[in-house]
């Protein structure tokens, strides 16, 4: 009787609760939306804020989104070609003994590491979209491709840039850059392993990542093409088309999330003037980071608290964070230890707050986005810490 009474009482209250929710949820949303608007509009001015928002989105579209699409087309074509001629299968066999204990991923994941290191985070999506590549993975491993790929995004660019600073530093940065790369590897392992804990619980460990039957059909279709030239051209064109689709799919996430992150990270023009130009902002993230500098400085061993601006900017854009380094060097605030930490964090984080959302969405794993970002945050912190202490140790030895 008590149970039935409770059920009836609950049923009677449900319509009232629903009416209350229908009123409160829109009001709460409007309050948060207006507050967010005021946070930007008060320091920048309403007109400048709107202009900056549109100009930043347009600049991201032309300079970043289309660049990512180009990367996706090239890497999509390359991955299809490597799959067609058995290179992925060979890598899977050779590197599984290394990748499985470190990352709990098949050896084929190493191809994603290489492609993102040579280009940028979304390059791994072109691989993950290929059914013949996905067959080496279990379902719980696919979401983790976002974290391992992002850990090495823009790796070659970051490494080359930091090595080129030797002249302005007055000493070689080679050891620091090496420690930075090693730190990024450590961060990638932590980020991927942590994330796999969540995906295993949700998806289990037995479900395949894709249809093996479909992958075999694709292979059989390809094998029927007798001429080598046709096999090469068809693989390139099919992979390139997948890249175009991926590039289009990632545009909304890049424009929306990146614009927000850039406006939270960057500040006004010199002299504190707002002009409505692209990439201006209220510098809220660096200000928040400065409040916890007492924690970050022991972890990273920064020479100056001003150096916190580099990893904070790397949350939104690795390229933008690299642009800060020469200014800090000119001000005499950077030592080789800082270069090691910059290398590790710029590579491991590489703008993950900007790309994680759209990458997870394209992988069909958007419900894991929050956990992926959380795990990658810890991965980046470990990358910087490991780079710092590795440099301290190796500089004593060498």
Image (tube, grey):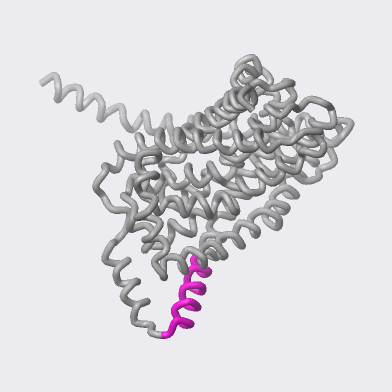
The residue lying at 51 percent from left, 34 percent from top is 187
> Residue lying farthest left?
1
Q: Is residue 2 left or right of residue 128?
A: left
Instruction: Locate residue 375, reporting x and y percent.
Output: 46, 33
260, above or below 254, in the image: above
Q: Residue at x 40, y 35 (%)?
A: 193
Location of residue 12 by image quarter? top left
Q: Is residue 325 visible?
A: yes
Magenta stretch, residue numbers: 227-242
**Figure check: 199 above or below 219:** above
Question: Residue 17 at what x, y percent from top left?
Answer: 37, 29
Decide whether the magenta segment is chiefly helix, strand or loop. Answer: helix
Pick the front one: 159 or 69 = 159
Q: Does residue 97 sit above or below 195 in this rendering?
A: below
Q: Is residue 315 visible?
A: no
Q: Residue at x 45, y 81 (%)?
A: 228
Q: Nearer the viewer, residue 94 or 215?
A: 94
Residue 396 x, y percent position in the rendering: 63, 22
């Amino acid at each position: 009787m008590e149970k039935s009474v409770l059920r009836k009482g609950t049923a009677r209250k449900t319509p009232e609760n629903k009416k209350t929710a229908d009123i409160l949820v829109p009001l709460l949303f409007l309050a948060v939306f207006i507050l967010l608007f005021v946070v930007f509009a008060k320091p920048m001015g309403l007109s400048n804020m709107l202009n900056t928002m549109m100009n930043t989105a347009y600049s991201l579209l032309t300079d970043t989104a289309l660049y990512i699409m180009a990367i996706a087309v090239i890497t999509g074509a390359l991955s299809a070609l490597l799959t067609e001629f058995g290179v992925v299968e060979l890598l899977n066999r050779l590197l599984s003994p290394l990748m499985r204990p470190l990352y709990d991923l098949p050896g084929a994941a190493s191809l994603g590491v290489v492609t993102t290191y040579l280009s940028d985070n979304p390059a791994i999506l072109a691989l993950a979209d290929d059914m013949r590549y996905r067959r080496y993975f279990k379902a719980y491993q696919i979401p983790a491709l976002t974290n391992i790929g992002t850990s090495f995004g823009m790796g070659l660019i970051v490494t080359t840039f930091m090595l080129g600073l030797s002249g302005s530093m007055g000493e070689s940065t080679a050891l620091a850059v090496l420690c930075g790369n090693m730190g990024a590897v450590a961060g990638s392992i932590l980020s991927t392993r942590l994330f796999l804990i969540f995906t295993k619980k949700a998806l289990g460990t037995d479900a395949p990542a894709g249809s093996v039957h479909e992958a075999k059909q694709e292979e059989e279709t390809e094998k029927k093409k007798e001429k080598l030239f046709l096999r090469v051209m068809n693989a390139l064109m099919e992979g390139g088309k997948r890249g175009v689709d991926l590039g289009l799919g990632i545009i909304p996430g890049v424009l929306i999330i990146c614009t927000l992150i850039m406006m939270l990270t960057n500040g006004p023009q010199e002299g504190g003037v707002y002009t409505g130009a692209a990439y201006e902002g209220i510098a809220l993230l660096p200000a928040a980071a400065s409040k916890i500098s007492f924690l970050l400085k022991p972890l990273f061993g920064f020479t100056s608290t001003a150096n916190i601006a580099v990893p904070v900017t790397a949350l939104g854009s690795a390229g933008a964070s690299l642009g800060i380094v020469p200014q800090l060097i000119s001000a005499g605030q950077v030592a080789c230890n800082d270069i090691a930490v910059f290398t590790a964090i710029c590579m491991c984080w590489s703008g993950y707050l900007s790309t994680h959302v759209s990458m997870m969405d394209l992988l069909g794993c958007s419900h894991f986005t929050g956990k992926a970002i959380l795990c990658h945050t810890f991965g980046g912190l470990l990358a910087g810490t490991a780079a710092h202490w590795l440099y301290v140790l190796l500089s004593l030895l060498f």
